[in-house]
């Protein structure tokens, strides 16, 4: 971004918003917006506490298990939709419908099926993450040149060999992109699940901070979650760059 012929770093906008936040917080104009400096101090105060460690463990288990299921189901299903016209016509409308639907409204339905507990939270994570993984994997598989598949068949490759050595690696850039987006959506899913299903993990901390009107603690925990989501995103962006050559070699 350039202003008046000078190149301004993109991070400059964050600095401007940080300064504005601090000024508004120091004036006390709003009870729900404490000074940013106080929020940052609370972040360093919260992280070492046993309650944060316990919440991170509970939330992390649901998050990792839900994403493992999403990847284990989403990638093969996306490959199936990309290679089978019949399956694509039968399943794709449902995938797009769930991707665009307000999934928070479906959490009570999941509660009725799986009850109040960790299983429902895990399934909420799956509901938020799996659909974008399916669509991105499907897009990657549909971008594979038919010559690659024909070559594998001419060498007598089985369907499993074609899956593991052709479809998966050729669609790997899109698969990783879908996983990255799915993980970001899963962060929202696990928190919504913990708030709506059973007040555990980070959902429990949010409930405590709000009920006691500890806004510095509330915003500090929210910023920590933003930082975790950003770190996950950057790690997967780095992995995507590492496998970009697959995209150019699949034709």
Image (tube, rainbow, N blue to C red):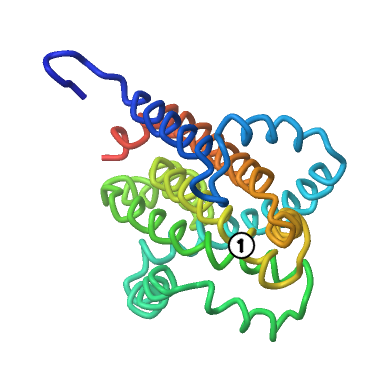
Report the number of numbered marks: 1
With 89 as the anchor, is 191 left or right in this view? right
Above or below residue 30? Residue 94 is below
- Which x, y percent locates residue 194? 70, 64
Above or below residue 204? Residue 156 is above
- Which x, y percent locates residue 51? 84, 46
Q: How crowded is mark 1: few (under 14 residues within 10 Å), some or many (20 or more)?
A: many
Above or below residue 72? Residue 229 is above
Task: Return the residue found at the far top.
Answer: 6
- Which x, y percent locates residue 75? 50, 56
- Which x, y percent locates residue 22? 49, 32
User: At 56% from the left edge and 51% from the top edge, which residue is drawn?
Assistant: 32
- Where, quadrant-wise, is the N terminus in this rendering? top left
User: At 31% from the left edge and 39% from the top edge, which residue is drawn?
Assistant: 250
User: At 59% from the left edge and 29% from the top edge, which residue is drawn?
Assistant: 37
With 210 as the anchor, is 11 left or right in this view? left
Which image quadrant for residue 14? top left
| Residue toward you, 185 or 79 | 185
- Where, quadrant-wise, is the C terminus in this rendering? top left
Task: Return the residue found at the far right.
Answer: 50
| Residue toward you, 135 or 148 | 135
Which image quadrant for residue 34? top right
Determine which residue is flagged by label 1: 125
| Residue toward you, 116 or 99 | 116
User: At 46% from the left edge and 33% from the top edge, which residue is drawn?
Assistant: 23
């Amino acid at each position: 971004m350039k202003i008046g012929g000078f190149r301004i770093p993109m991070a400059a906008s964050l600095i401007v918003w940080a300064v504005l936040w601090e000024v508004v917080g120091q004036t006390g104009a709003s009870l729900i917006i404490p000074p940013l400096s106080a929020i940052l101090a609370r972040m360093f105060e919260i992280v070492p506490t046993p309650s944060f460690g316990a919440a991170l463990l509970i939330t992390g288990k649901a998050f990792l298990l839900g994403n493992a299921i999403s990847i284990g189901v989403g990638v093969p299903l996306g490959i199936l939709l990309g290679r089978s016209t019949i399956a694509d016509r039968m399943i794709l409308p449902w995938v797009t419908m769930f991707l665009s639907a307000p999934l928070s409204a479906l959490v009570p339905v999941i509660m009725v099926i799986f009850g109040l507990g960790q299983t429902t939270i895990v399934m909420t994570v799956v509901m938020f993450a799996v659909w974008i993984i399916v669509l991105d994997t499907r897009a990657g598989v549909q971008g594979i040149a038919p010559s690659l598949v024909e070559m594998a068949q001419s060498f007598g490759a089985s369907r499993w060999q074609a899956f593991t050595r052709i479809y998966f690696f050729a669609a790997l850039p899109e698969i990783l992109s879908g996983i990255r987006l799915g993980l970001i959506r899963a962060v929202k899913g696990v928190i919504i699940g913990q708030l709506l299903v059973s007040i555990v993990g980070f959902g429990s901390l949010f409930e405590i901070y709000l009920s006691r009107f500890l806004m510095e603690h509330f915003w500090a925990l929210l910023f920590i979650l933003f930082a975790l989501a950003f770190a996950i995103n950057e790690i997967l962006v780095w992995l995507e760059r590492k496998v970009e050559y697959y995209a150019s070699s699949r034709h």
